[in-house]
Amino acid sequence: MNKSCLNGLGFALFIVLLLSCNSSGGLQVPGETKRVQENLLSEYFLVGDAYLENKKYDKAIEFYTKALEHPNLTDSARYKIAYSYALAENWDKAIPAYKDLLAKDPQNMELEKSLAYLYARQGNLAHSAATYRKLTEKNPYDQALVENFITVLIAGNYLEEAEVALERLKTDFPENTTAEELEKQLAAGWEALEGKPPVPLEDEKQEDASTEGEEPPPAEEETDGESVSLQSTHG
């Protein structure tokens, strides 16, 4: 066999090997594995969205958890997990999840509003009122926020502070349509209280000093058997 034939066979063998590598994955395009993995994680996130929309919260959390490894979706997946717990009314998991989000984004007022709401739904009115108080001090002209604060104060029998907050609500928002109903709730609260002192209201320092893993304080007695009705802010 002459030299030209050998050269021809060598070139043919190179082509065969190249085609074989491309078809079997033997040769990897730089970054291809990472791209494929991120695409898969993105699909997990979308599947989580579909389950969330259909109120399949456990499945949504399962797929959002899988999507946590995506470098560009980690924060969104963490939020969606917390939001799913909240919608599932799993307060014991939703509250720590929102606290973790708030720790990473401490200036996010919407997260703090959600946390106050979740405390109230859990029945932890002391923590809820403390969080709402801090929020209303920073945002005194957020009408819905003030209304929720008053509702929690009444439910927790913190009636003197509720009276002060209600008067401020009527002064700052003269066109407010909920003040009359809140006044009725407050009057019923005083009637039901019958001189019984409320549980001491927690302040910000007490809230910050609370440790993870502690059993939550028992829920305070609600006024006249009514449940706390708040404007939902979570999510």
Image (cartoon, rainbow, N blue to C red):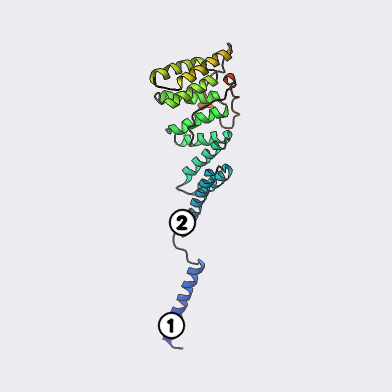
Relative to 154, is 102 above or below? below
The number of numbered discs placed on residues in the rendered structure image is 2
Q: Camera-side residue: 35 or 2?
A: 35
Could you tell me residue 114's position as x and y percent?
49, 32
Separation of residues labelled 1 and 2 (CA atoms): 38 Å
Q: Camera-side residue: 182 or 213?
A: 182
| Number of other residues with Cα within 10 Å of mark 1, as a class: few under 14, some 14 to 19, many 20 or more | few
Residue at 46 percent of width and 56 percent of height: 35
Q: From this viewpoint, which residue is outermost toward the top?
A: 195
Element marked by disc 2: helix
Could you tell me residue 153's position as x and y percent?
51, 20
Q: Amino acid at mark 1?
A: Gly
Residue at 49 percent of width and 34 percent of height: 234
Q: Camera-side residue: 22 or 208?
A: 22
Element marked by disc 1: helix
* Residue 5, image quadrant: bottom left
Q: Amino acid at mark 2?
A: Arg
Instruction: Check disc 2 and report the residue beneath it.
Output: 35
**Residue 8, which numbered label?**
1
**Residue 235, which numbered label?**
none
Camera-nearest label, 1 or 2? 2
Relative to 71, is 193 above or below? above
Could you tell me residue 52's position as x and y percent?
53, 43
Instruction: Give whichever of discs 1 and 2 has the lower sequence position.
Output: 1
| Number of other residues with Cα within 10 Å of mark 2, as a class: few under 14, some 14 to 19, many 20 or more | few
Could you tell me residue 56's position as x and y percent?
57, 43
Left or right: 199 as drawn, with respect to 32: right
Relative to 87, is 62 above or below? below
Look at the image and tell me whether residue 187 can be seen. Answer: yes
Residue at 57 percent of width and 29 percent of height: 122
Marks 1/2 in contact by CB < 8 Å: the verdict is no
* Residue 84, image quadrant: top right
